[in-house]
Amino acid sequence: MIKKPMGDGIRHTIDELGVGGLGLLANLIGGARGTTFPGQDALDLVDGARYIPNAVTFARRSGQEVRFVKNGLNRAEWFWEMPDGEKIKHG
């Protein structure tokens, strides 16, 4: 667990690699298509994403390809490119 100072207290955040690893395990158990937690979602978490938008997960569950694009180190410039060309910003 990573501890980060926040205001006058300490906020605990989930270790992203741990969540991604858990997601990959869930994907292996459930298969690829139609899974609750698609493997590519887990890889996005391992690759630095802090969350996965519902639209991304739903598209991947239905077998569509969604790309996670990291432009630089600033997460505000990262996005997911949907099959129809729409871009969903990471934040």
Image (cartoon, grey):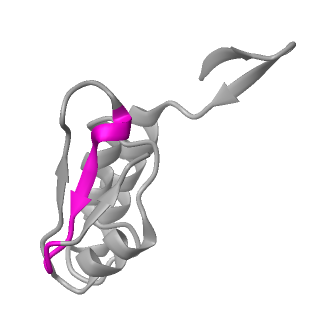
Residue 79 within the segment the image draws in magenta: yes
Specify the segment rendered in magenta.
75-85
Task: Please provide percent x and percent y for residue 2.
Answer: 58, 19
Residue at 35%, 71% (x, y): give it: 57
| Left or right: 84 in relation to 73 | left
Quadrant of the drawing holding the N terminus: top right
Task: Please provide percent x and percent y for residue 6.
Answer: 74, 19
Q: Quadrant of residue 73?
A: top left
Task: Please provide percent x and percent y for residue 12.
Answer: 69, 26
Residue at 57%, 34% (x, y): give it: 14
* Picture layout, residue 40 above or below residue 8: below
Residue at 22%, 72% (x, y): give it: 86
Residue 3 within the segment the image draws in magenta: no
User: Which is more toward the observer, 33 or 28?
Assistant: 33
| Left or right: 82 in relation to 22 | left
* Picture layout, residue 32 above or below residue 81: below
